[in-house]
């Protein structure tokens, strides 16, 4: 049986990368899978976060799930800290995973930066909690953006080692689902940097809460290059951008990817439409498209956040359903490891 699990951190500033790289795919998958979508507040406190802001952000992510099209009647939406299986399984996995595996995690190195000694232990063991999130539900498929690929490999390693340590096939070996043209949406200010919640400049990203004027303004100011839009020669035989254009025109590639993902048009068609045109023309079209796709999401988030009891009811029901699935799995895990 296949079961989908994924999570989004309530660390504020949900952006276009989260939407195109993850949430849009969450919506597609619910058509023919059992899906569990989690607001991962335990992950969010691995860096300092004001408690009131955390509460507000949790509701905002849950609202964004629904506003993007996740149907709470069909899919489970819940908050990580409300289901104890995550913390319990994370401890067991702390004892299964090896130090050397964590030392390879590039995201820790990036996030801790130069101040490694001052980073929280939680930030370091973060991918273990992620493995626990997924495996507490025996999830088989995990839709994420490209930046989570290494963490999902670690989840596979942990499941394999647990199974071989205890001589069983208890945990599934999870498949990452990294789909679409927008698996890595880049910053609007620097095409070599990922669009991210924590980037200081708000002009680097389109937030899901941005209004029409903000969207138009940010796209207008987005970095480009002095050339016109490229022609089909920029694609290789496999339909992907050639290395040369990726190296030389990363901002152009990023904006074309965003256009293709938002319009759901194949890249060949997008390039044919704009080839030889100036950026002013392309940016106007991209702004119209982004406004058309993102403002209904933004409006719906606002509407949902105005209805607290509706949101709380969804999260309560989600929590109950999540416990129903994870309880027997965590209980069996405890029996396997020999807890008293
Ligand atoms: P988070 O909260 O940073 O991001 C949520 C999702 O958005 C994707 N994403 C992007 N996709 C494309 N382009 C970008 N610029 C971009 N930025 C972010 C992420 O890949 C992610 O899918 N550790 C995870 C949350 C998590 C999780 C899990 C995911 C916790 N437990 C279990 C899957 C399964 C994270 O920090 O995502």
Image: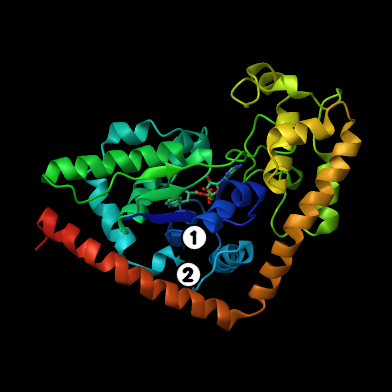
Q: Does mark 2's beta carbon lie closer than 8 Å to ligand 1?
A: no
Q: Residue lying farthest top?
A: 244
Name the residue beneath numbered marker 2.
Answer: 74
* Comes first in the chain, label 2 or label 1: 1
- 84 horizontally vs 29: left or right: left
Left or right: where 308 falls relative to 136: right
Query: Can the viewer see residue 121?
Result: no
- Most extreme residue toward the bottom, as rendered? 309
Q: Is residue 93 left or right of residue 109?
A: left
Give the residue pinned by disc 1. Answer: 30
Q: Residues within 10 Å of mark 2 (few under 14, many from 20)?
A: few
The residues bearing labels 2 and 1 have C-alpha atoms spaced at a distance of 7 Å
The kind of secondary structure element at disc 1 is loop
Task: Give me the residue at 55% from left, 66% from top.
Answer: 62
- Residue drawn at x 85%, y 40% is 283
Residue under the point 34% across and 47% down:
128
Image location (x, y in percent) of residue 25: 55, 51
Residue drawn at point x = 36 percent, y = 51 percent: 129
Residue 1 picture location, percent across and down: 31, 56
Q: Quadrant of the C terminus?
A: bottom left
Seen from the viewer's position, the closer of residues 237 and 198 is: 237
Residue 287 in sight = yes
Residue 108's x, y, as percent? 45, 38
Mark 2 residue element: loop
Q: Position of residue 252 (x, y in %)?
A: 76, 30
| Total numbered labels | 2
| Residue 274 against residue 23 in the figure, above or below | above
At label 1, counting other C-alpha atoms closer than 10 Å, the crowd grade (few under 14, some 14-19, many 20 or more) is: some
Dot 2 and dot 1 residues touching (CB under 8 Å): yes
- Does residue 316 lie above or below 148 as drawn? below
């Amino acid at each position: 049986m296949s079961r989908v699990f994924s999570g989004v951190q309530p660390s504020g500033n949900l952006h276009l990368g989260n939407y195109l790289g993850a949430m849009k795919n969450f919506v597609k998958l619910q058509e023919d899978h059992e899906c569990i979508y989690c607001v991962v507040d335990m992950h969010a406190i691995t860096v300092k976060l004001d408690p009131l802001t955390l509460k507000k952000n949790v509701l905002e992510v849950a609202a964004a799930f629904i506003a993007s099209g996740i149907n709470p009647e069909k899919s489970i939406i819940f908050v990580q800290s409300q289901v104890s299986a995550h913390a319990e399984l994370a401890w067991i996995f702390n004892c299964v995973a090896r130090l050397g595996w964590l030392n390879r995690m590039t995201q820790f190195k990036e996030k801790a930066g130069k101040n490694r000694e001052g980073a929280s232990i939680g930030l370091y063991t973060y991918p273990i909690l992620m493995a626990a999130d997924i495996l507490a539900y025996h999830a088989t498929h995990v839709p994420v953006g490209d930046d989570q690929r290494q963490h999902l490999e670690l989840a596979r390693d942990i499941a394999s080692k647990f199974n071989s340590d205890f001589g069983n096939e208890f945990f599934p070996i999870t498949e990452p689902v990294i789909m679409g043209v927008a698996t890595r949406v880049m910053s609007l200010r620097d095409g070599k940097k990922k669009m991210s919640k924590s980037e200081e400049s708000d002009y680097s990203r389109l937030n899901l809460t941005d209004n029409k004027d903000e969207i138009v303004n940010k796209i207008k100011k987005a970095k480009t290059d002095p050339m016109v839009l490229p022609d089909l020669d920029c694609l290789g035989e496999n339909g992907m951008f050639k290395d040369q254009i990726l190296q030389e025109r990363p901002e152009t590639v990023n904006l074309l990817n965003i256009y293709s993902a938002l319009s759901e048009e194949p890249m060949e068609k997008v390039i044919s439409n704009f080839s030889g045109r100036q950026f002013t023309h392309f940016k106007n079209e991209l702004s119209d498209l982004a406004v058309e796709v993102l403002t209904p999401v933004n409006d719906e988030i606002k509407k949902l956040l105005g209805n607290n009891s509706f949101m709380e009811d969804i999260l309560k029901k989600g929590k109950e359903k999540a416990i129903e699935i994870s309880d027997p799995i965590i209980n069996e895990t405890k029996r396997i490891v020999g807890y008293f």
